[in-house]
Amino acid sequence: QVQLVDSGGGLVLAGGSLRLSCAASGNIFRFNTMGWYRRAPGKQRELVAAVTSGGSRNYADSVKGRFTITRDSAKDAAYLQMNSLKVEDTAIYYCNGDIVHGSGAGQYWGQGTQVTVSS
């Protein structure tokens, strides 16, 4: 059974920083892509950042230059470093993985971690 657990959210003042972590467990062969999505109140879920197995990264325009996604393949983990946080970054953040594992392959989601940025 593949499982993603994300953590690291919290309450921070505008201009501050947070680091989100995503830890995967299970009989994992590899991640094709790992990413972070978020859902703000009253809005649809959106892609924040993603990194492929080859190391290519893409970011939402709203976070470019402020957020950095990294992955540690040896630990089956991914991280999202968020700097210069803005009030509009407030959302629930979800880790996502496109995973090849012992029973096949599929998309998996973490349970979500709340990020609240206050002014």
Image (spheres, rainbow, N blue to C red):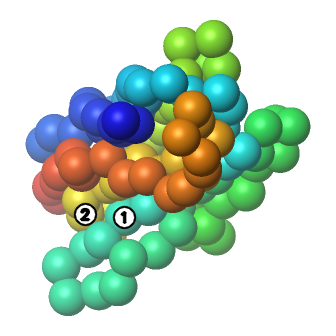
Q: Which amino acid type is marked by label 2?
A: Ala
Q: Residue at x 64, y 41 (%)?
A: 100
Image coordinates for residue 7, horizontal then vertical, percent: 26, 33
Q: Residue at x 58, y 36 (%)?
A: 101
Q: Is residue 98 above or below residue 61?
A: above
The residue positioned farthest toward the front in the image shown:
103
Q: Which amino acid type is marked by label 1?
A: Arg
Q: Is residue 90 left or right of residue 55?
A: left
The residue lying toward the viewer, choosing from 116 and 113, is 113
Q: Quadrant of the N terminus?
A: top left
Q: Quadrant of the C terminus?
A: bottom left
What kind of element bears circle 1?
Answer: strand
Q: Which residue is mark 2?
A: 91
Question: Taking the image as drawn, is residue 89 in sight?
Answer: yes
Image coordinates for residue 16, horizontal then vertical, percent: 32, 38
What kind of element bears circle 2?
Answer: strand
The residue lying toward the viewer, choosing from 11 and 15, is 11
Image coordinates for residue 87, horizontal then vertical, percent: 26, 63
The residue positioned farthest toward the top in the image shown:
74
Q: Which residue is mark 1?
A: 38
